[in-house]
Image: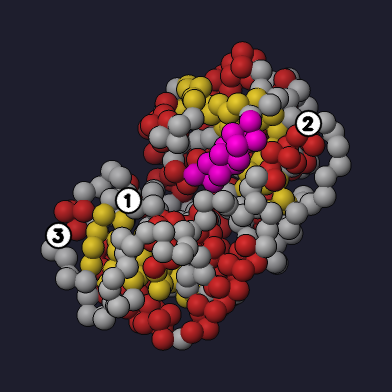
Amino acid sequence: MRVLLTTKRGAGHFGPLIPFARAFRRAGATVLVAAPHSAREMVRAEGLSTWLFDDAPEHERDAIFAAAWQLPEEERGPYVFAEAFIRVDARAALPGMLDACRRWNPDIVVSEISEVAGPLAAEALGIPSVCVGIFQQGTSEGVVTAGGVMPAIDELRAALGLAPDPDGERLLSTPYFTLLPEALEDPSLPVSRTAWRFRDLEAPLTGGHTDRFAGDERPLVYLTFGSVAPTMDFFPDVFRGAIDAFSALPIRVLVTVGRDRDPADLGRLPANVQVERWVPQREVMPHAAAMVCHGGSGTVTMGLAAGVPMAVVPLFADQPSNARRVEEIGAGIALDGGPQAVSRLGDAVSKLLVDPAYGANAERVADEMRSLPSVDAAPVIARAILEDRPVAAMH
């Protein structure tokens, strides 16, 4: 089986595809990743071959994101999806996606949900496709079917000679795979398709596989704001504010600032704080007593898989909805207020460490995730889709 993975740039987009790429390779499939040039190093670091094409114009994306910050929060997601992800990113990617599909001739195309060019190219050429969800399903479907998004997609559909899809019926009929646990989904949001949920085989290490973060009786708090926030104006102030909130607590803190930032930019550090560019989260999680994060879907899912309670300071995108859901299931504390909320992190983390209910609720979700089929079931389902055989949903 030849599998074409399609992605946008950014670890938050490519990262959720990695477990599926590994699963397809373990199943004997040949895997190729179609992505913009800016994703080259990230993809090749995973040992995957790439089909590269030009990035979208940076100045156009910058203007869209700047305008988005001026909109009410509920309007930002649909605006960014329509204007940046479709009219800029997908339009720029579509020629490369078509070229990859025509010349490499994949059996199936697997795309993360915000990458639209791959599924459209697949549909135009009659190739089956699968969508990998990287956000809450109800939230992402709500964004896709919002007022301005489907007209933007229909512009690309028209260019490909495809019939309009004004209600998103065709788009949302694609099989949906995800690593997000059902507990993280917002039950108040309707969804239109069945989800196949899997657990990542590269889940947090357990059983003392690494002692890098062991050997200290003080509880370890892991602080990360993901891969995007460090590249924005949130750095260094948000990081510094969080560090200062922890300076007087009897804890040790591990902070990661991203591969493109220098830890030295955070200045003099308290004795209980260690800052690194990047560490494998799966090595940290078994030792973490609590986590502080931005609410990115991948980070929250990793924390829940390890049963680690968290304090969440949402900054943008899907993060507020994830933060609310973490608090609703009792696995953590959501701190509204944007960057200024970091000043309240000391009290929030102290509460997480003192009240065992947060850890117990996070561990309950971890148990639910361990009961899911492994991601190695995904190639089996994909092959059934190719052979047009019925498959039972896995929740």
Horizontal placement of 245 versus 100: left or right?
Answer: left
Q: Position of residue 392 (x, y in %)?
A: 82, 50
Whether 23 is among the magenta residues is yes
Residue corresponding to mark 2 = 386
**Which portion, as a residue range, is magenta?**
15-28
Residue at image position (75%, 34%) is 383
Residue that sits furthest to the left in the current view: 268
Labels 3 and 1: the sequence-earlier one: 3
Residues at circles 2 and 1 in contact by the CB criterion of under 8 Å: no
Residues at circles 3 and 1 in contact by the CB criterion of under 8 Å: no
Residues at circles 2 and 3 in contact by the CB criterion of under 8 Å: no
**Of discs 2 and 3, which sits in the foreground?**
2
Residue corresponding to mark 3 = 267
Circle 2 Cα neighbour tier, 10 Å, few/some/many (<14 / 14–19 / ≥20): some
Residue that sits furthest to the top in the current view: 103
Q: Secondary structure at mark 2?
A: helix
Q: Position of residue 272 (x, y in %)?
A: 21, 71
Colouring scheme applied when the structure was drawn? secondary structure
Is residue 86 in view from this perspective? no
Tell me which amino acid carries mark 3.
Gly
Horizontal placement of 20 versus 188: left or right?
Answer: left
- Residue situated in front as seen by the camera: 239 or 49: 49
Q: Quadrant of residue 256?
A: bottom left
Q: Position of residue 108 (x, y in %)?
A: 69, 29
Q: Give the Cα separation between the discs numbered 2 and 1.
A: 39 Å
Tell me which amino acid carries mark 1.
Trp
Horizontal placement of 12 versus 177: left or right?
Answer: left
Residue at image position (78%, 27%) is 163
Residue corresponding to mark 1 = 278
Q: Give the Cα separation between the discs numbered 3 and 1.
A: 18 Å
Residue at image position (39%, 52%) is 280
